[in-house]
Amino acid sequence: MRFIKRMRPPLRWQFGLLSVSGLLMLIIASCQGEQPIQYLMEVTREVTLVVVVTATPSSPQPDTPEITAPIPVTPEPVLPTPTAEATAEQTRIDPFPAPIVSEIIVAEQVFERGRMFYLQPSGEIWVLQNGSSGEDELSGSWTPQDDTWQEGMPEFDPAITAPEGLFQPERGFGKLWRENPSIQEALGWALEAEYGHVTEYSYTYGGQVNAQATYVQGPGTHTIRSREGDTFVFYEADATWERIEAEAPEQTPAG
């Protein structure tokens, strides 16, 4: 997967309660008024696509820098005078952060006993290992890894020959796979070439609001939509994932 224009801040994953800070700050920024970004993506060596990404926030996020953007001139709305009840309600704003929803560029590749996702905003590779010794394709464990491959490095190892019908992962996935025997053993060979696309991403905060009405962060939950339309849910609390399969479209009776 090659992103000809690649915007990868030098962030390092901090797994645990603060594990998502880098990725979330990038996504929050994209949700606060930035213009659509055009990416030239090499999905395969033969096919190149131009993708325009526009982030769509679910709601304004607290405690994030405000991005100033030109505002079209419109008449000022006439607002009713606030009542005592309305004023009191405003003071009871829930300090718990709202979920973050956005669109991001990812690459993914399916393996014999798992899957890899590359997240373009953070430059990380999420490694998913199937449960039940690789047999369970609906749940398992996951770990975030840094993508250390750079342009100019070997894309694959010509000395490695995959069995017929299987693939040696390449570029960032391949480097991680070749340099980590435990990952190679856990995932096995790739079942297909990697695939890049724009997908839905969300993060739901964990934690609680204490007696002083202050939000205390705790492990949260990520979701990523796969190329098949299935939703992958990543739990920070126990480093597990589950796959929620997309509902099959209803069949229209013939005639």
Image (tube, helix red, strand yellow):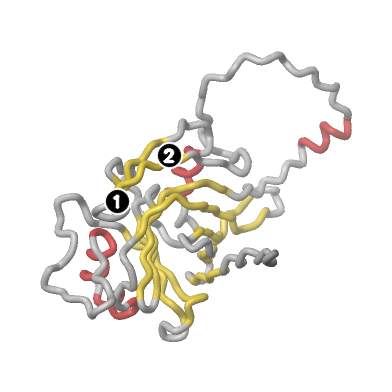
Given the image, on which type of amino acid does mark 1 rest? Val
Residue at position x 31%, y 72% from top? 190
Assign a secondary structure to mark 2. strand
Q: Are marks 1 and 2 in contact (CB under 8 Å)?
A: no
Residue 118 in sight: no
Pick the residue in front: 152 or 254.
254
How far across and down, in percent of the image, does residue 57 sit? 57, 42
Pick the residue in front: 128 or 240.
128
* Quarter that holds the N terminus: bottom left
Dot 2, crowdedness within 10 Å: few (<14), some or many (≥20)? few
Dot 1, crowdedness within 10 Å: few (<14), some or many (≥20)? few
How far across and down, in percent of the image, does residue 241 sit? 50, 70
* Quarter that holds the C terminus: bottom right
Mark nearer the N terminus (1 vs 2): 1
Measured in 3D between alpha carbons, the distance from the residue under mark 1 to the one under mark 2, in whole angstroms, is 16 Å
Q: Which residue is mark 1?
A: 47
Pick the residue in front: 80 or 237.
80
Residue at position x 29%, y 80% from top? 185
Residue 70 in sight: yes
Which dot, 1 or 2, sits closer to the camera?
Answer: 1
Given the image, on which type of amino acid does mark 2 rest? Val
How far across and down, in percent of the image, does residue 204 sit? 59, 55
Assign a secondary structure to mark 1. loop
Q: Which residue is mark 2?
A: 52
Q: Which mark is residue 245?
A: none
How far across and down, in percent of the image, does residue 5 sit? 29, 40
Residue at position x 33%, y 62% from top? 194
Q: Residue furthest right?
A: 84
Residue at position x 38%, y 69% from top? 110
Residue 51 lies left or right of residue 55; in this view the side is left
